[in-house]
Image (spheres, rainbow, N blue to C red):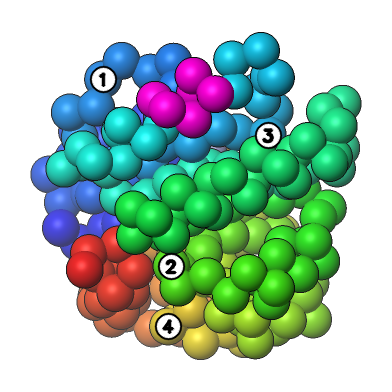
């Protein structure tokens, strides 16, 4: 593996890419590395317990690398207290099954950091699709969150500046749902960092092993 796609919704057939494909409790195919969780957009009181059980069962699967995406989103029409409750349930599963968390966070970074401080989890938390300021990035990193970056580093100069300043040890790269290849994300990331792609590959492979393979 030369490329790690830390969060995506589509499986890559490329031999040199390891993708962590996001799955839901409604997914059927678990034949390649995946993460599974209850996304805040889709939480539903009526089948929550069933879905938690399904996620819990899949956490024992040999292909399961993480729980998620799960998290908090203040821009959606789902009760925020309920979102927090479901997030905490998944944090508990992450600790119980020793799987890192892949977090979806929209305008709720302070809440995520608060949870991190108060619950003091042993498992690594990866904040996917990071797209905010240097100040917020630094505050996340201070609280030992890993930041995963995707297409936005290509399109947004400000985010590229943020990315440029961060240590390679605290980051991952991803394609998410975006129309971009992981090769392109790595290429741009190495240009922003002004390093060889190979050097980036080595560090991110090491990060991947530290976080997901224990
Ligand atoms: Zn996603």
Secondary structure, mark 3, is: helix
On screen, residue 208 above or below 84: below
* Picture disc at residue 123: 2
Q: Earlier in the sequence, mark 4 or mark 2?
A: 2
- Ligand 1's image quarter is top right
Calculate the distance from the C-alpha at mark 1 to the C-alpha at mark 4: 32 Å
Residue 169: assigned label: 4
Highlighted magenta segment, given as a residue range? 49-54
Whether 52 is among the magenta residues is yes
Residue tagged by mark 3? 40
Q: Is residue 148 left or right of residue 153?
A: left
The mark that comes first in sequence, 3 or 2, is 3
Q: Which mark is residue 29?
A: 1
Helix, strand or loop at label 1? It is loop
- Asked which quadrant contains residue 59, the reply is top left
Of the numbered discs 1 and 4, the one sitting upstream in the chain is 1
| In this rendering, the label closer to the viewer, 4 or 2 | 2
User: Mark 3 or mark 2, which is nearer to you?
Assistant: 2
Badge 2 element: loop
Of labels 1 and 2, earlier in sequence is 1
Badge 2 crowding class, 10 Å Cα cut-off, few under 14, some 14 to 19, many 20 or more, is some
Mark 4, Cα crowd under 10 Å, few <14 / some 14-19 / many 20+, is: few
Q: Which of the pair 175/85 is nearer the observer?
A: 85
Q: Main secondary structure of the magenta part?
A: helix
Q: Residue at x 44, y 22 (%)?
A: 25
Q: Distance from label 3 to label 2 (Cα)?
A: 20 Å
Residue 5: % across, % down: 36, 51
Residue visible at 43% across and 60% down in the picture: 95
């Amino acid at each position: 593996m030369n490329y790690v796609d830390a969060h995506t919704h589509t499986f890559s057939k490329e031999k040199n890419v390891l993708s962590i494909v996001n799955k839901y409790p409604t997914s059927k195919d678990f034949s390649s590395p995946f993460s599974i969780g209850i996304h805040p957009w889709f939480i539903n009181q009526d089948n929550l317990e069933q879905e938690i059980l399904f996620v819990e069962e899949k956490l024992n699967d040999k292909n399961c690398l993480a729980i998620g995406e799960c998290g908090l989103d203040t821009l959606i029409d789902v009760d925020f207290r309920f979102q927090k409750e479901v997030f905490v349930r998944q944090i508990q599963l992450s600790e119980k099954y020793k799987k890192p968390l892949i977090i979806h966070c929209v305008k709720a970074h302070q809440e995520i950091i608060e949870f991190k401080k108060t619950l003091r989890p042993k498992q690594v938390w990866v904040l996917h699709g990071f797209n905010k300021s240097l100040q917020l990035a630094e505050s996340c990193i201070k609280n030992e969150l890993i930041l995963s970056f995707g297409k936005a580093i290509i399109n947004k100069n400000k985010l590229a500046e943020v990315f440029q300043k961060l240590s390679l040890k605290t980051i991952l790269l991803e394609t998410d749902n975006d129309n971009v290849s992981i090769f392109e994300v790595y290429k741009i990331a190495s240009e922003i960092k002004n390093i060889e792609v190979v050097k980036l590959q080595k560090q991110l492979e090491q990060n991947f092993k530290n976080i997901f393979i224990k």
